[in-house]
Image (spheres, helix red, strand yellow):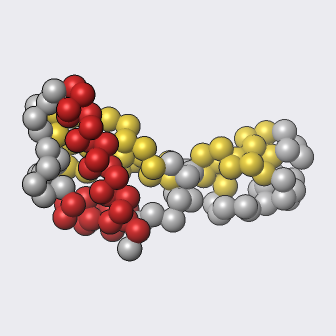
Amino acid sequence: MHEMALSASVIALVEDAARRENFSRARVVVLELGELGHVEPEAMLFCFDAVSRGTVAEGARLDIVRVPGAGWCLDCARTVALSERFGACPDCGGRRVQMTAGDELRVRELEVD
């Protein structure tokens, strides 16, 4: 379950921010999670709760914002929705699509005390 390691990395970011910004407790962590990133939101919630024990994020609520997949089609020169990695362009069927969104794993916001 790689979500455990990902959750540990998120907690490390929160603790770094606590030292840098001088806060003692995170109440809410807002996490952007790409739909094409192969990360299960339910597993992240479970792992975040387990990994946050004994840290500044213990008891914090993890809010997950799903980011839909998108890409730039080099054949039709437009941004298109993607439902899978390396998928064909839904407009022209071309296979030269560069993913531009949907792979995120980013702490977007912290609510702290």
The quarter in which the C terminus is drawn is top left
Residue 32 in the image: x percent, y percent? 42, 46
49 is higher (above) or lower (below) than 16:
below
Q: Nearer the viewer, residue 51 or 43?
A: 51
The single residue placed furthest to the top in the displayed view is: 21
**What residue appears at the point 74 percent right and 48 percent down from the top-left corner?**
98
Residue 103 in the image: x percent, y percent? 55, 52
Q: Nearer the viewer, residue 39 or 56?
A: 56
Judge from the rendering whether residue 6 lies leftward or rightward of residue 93; answer left or right: left
**What residue appears at the point 78 percent right and 51 percent down from the top-left corner?**
97
Residue 46 in the image: x percent, y percent? 25, 66
**What residue appears at the point 21 percent right and 60 percent down from the top-left corner?**
51
The single residue placed furthest to the bottom in the displayed view is: 1
Residue 4 in the image: x percent, y percent? 32, 66
19 is higher (above) or lower (below) than 41:
above
Judge from the rendering whether residue 47 lies leftward or rightward of residue 56; answer left or right: right
**What residue appears at the point 26 percent right and 34 percent down from the top-left corner?**
17
Q: Can residue 102 be seen in this view?
A: yes
In the rendered image, which quarter is residue 52 located in?
A: bottom left
